[in-house]
Image (tube, rainbow, N blue to C red):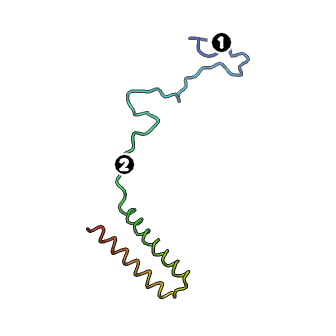
Amino acid sequence: MSSNVGLSTPRGSGTSGYVQRNLSNLRPRDDHKFTPYPPQHRQRQPNSEILEHDRLRQIEVQVFELRDKLEDEGVEEDEIETRTEGLRRKLLSAEGEGEGG
């Protein structure tokens, strides 16, 4: 073998003795173009539509909890609708005042 690379003889090794370069071995370089990891992540601003959706979802969760509680107490359906709509309007107006002020 040349340059003392590989096996001295391929006999009994089950290989042909052909030596190849390892192309998957990455060596550190000055340019970071070929680094196996991405650059540092920049913090992005949250999406306003998603924040609005989450806010409305929290309001609906509170409305549903009230509806569930009233149904367990055996309140009539019309009264349940009235109370849940009132709570929904109250929460939406409170959220609107909080954002404006």
Residue 17, position as x, y percentages in the image: 65, 18
Give the quadrant of residue 20.
top right
51 versus 15 height, above or below: below
Question: Residue 8: which disc?
Answer: 1
34 versus 4 height, above or below: below
Choose mark 2 or mark 1, whichever is in front: 2
> For the view shown, which residue lies furthest in the right direction?
12
23 versus 10 height, above or below: below
- List the residue tagged with mark 2: 43
Residue 2, position as x, y percentages in the image: 58, 11
Q: What element carries label 2?
A: loop
35 versus 98 height, above or below: above
Residue 69, position as x, y percentages in the image: 52, 78
Check disc 1 and give the amino acid type: Ser
CA distance separating discs 2 and 1: 56 Å
Residue 79, position as x, y percentages in the image: 47, 87
Tag 1: Cα neighbours inside 10 Å, few (<14), some, or many (≥20)? few
